[in-house]
Amino acid sequence: MQVPVTVCNQGTMPAQPHPVDLLLSTVATLPASAIQGEPVESPTLSRLGSVQVPRLEAGECVSVEGSVNAVPPQAAQPGVALYLGASAKLYDPELRKDNNGFVRGTLVVSTTP
């Protein structure tokens, strides 16, 4: 599926190019580690892939699109809605990391048409 991603640099310094991981979750919130842009291993999450974000100046936003496969998390139940999330993987020091991940929208993944 094609997934559009909009990323904004809310800081006061430029952000270097970085990936944004796209996640599928069985719950409407992400663990604190995902929100802070750190790797996450959980039966309630699956990493679908990532999109690359270019360098962003302070206050700048960019929209990019990625193509990923919707693979349900291990804990997913058939026919139950899942939540699409994203987690920015920044490698530079930041004053705030609590705004690097979020969950938006629901979708149902099925093997039938």
Image (cartoon, rainbow, N blue to C red):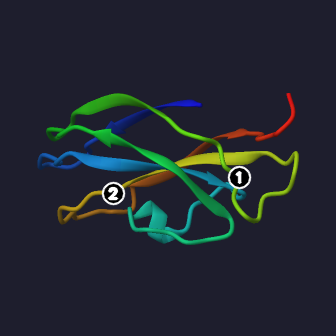
Residue 109 relative to residue 84: left or right: right
Image quarter of residue 56: top left
Q: Mark 2, mark 1: which one is toward the viewer?
A: 1
User: Looking at the image, which is closer to me, 22 or 68?
Assistant: 68
Question: Of helix, strand and loop, which one carries label 1?
Answer: loop
Q: Where is residue 55 in the image (x, y as percent from the top left)?
A: 17, 40
- Tell which circle, 2 or 1, labels the residue nearer the N-terminal end: 1
Structural distance between the alpha carbons of marks 2 and 1:
22 Å
Residue under the image location 18 percent in, 48 percent down = 15
Label drawn at residue 49? none
Tell me, yes or no, whether the two marked residues, 2 and 1, touch with CB atoms within 8 Å: no
Q: Position of residue 111 (x, y in %)?
A: 82, 39
Residue 104 relative to residue 89: left or right: right
Residue under the image location 43 percent in, 34 percent down = 5
Residue under the image location 57 percent in, 61 percent down = 30
Residue type, label 2: Lys
Residue type, label 1: Pro
Question: Dot 1 surroundings within 10 Å: few (below 14), some, or many (20 or more)?
Answer: many
Residue at the disc numbered 1: 72
**Where 65 falls versus 22 (above or below)?**
above
Question: Of helix, strand and loop, which one carries label 2?
Answer: loop
* Quadrant where the image shows the N terminus: top right
Q: Where is residue 62 in the image (x, y as percent from the top left)?
A: 30, 30
Residue at the disc numbered 2: 89
User: Looking at the image, which is closer to me, 10 or 57?
Assistant: 57
Q: Position of residue 84 (x, y in %)?
A: 61, 45
Question: Dot 2 surroundings within 10 Å: few (below 14), some, or many (20 or more)?
Answer: many
* Quadrant where the image shows the C terminus: top right
User: Looking at the image, which is closer to me, 80 or 112?
Assistant: 112
Residue 84 relative to residue 13: left or right: right
Total numbered labels placed on residues in the image: 2
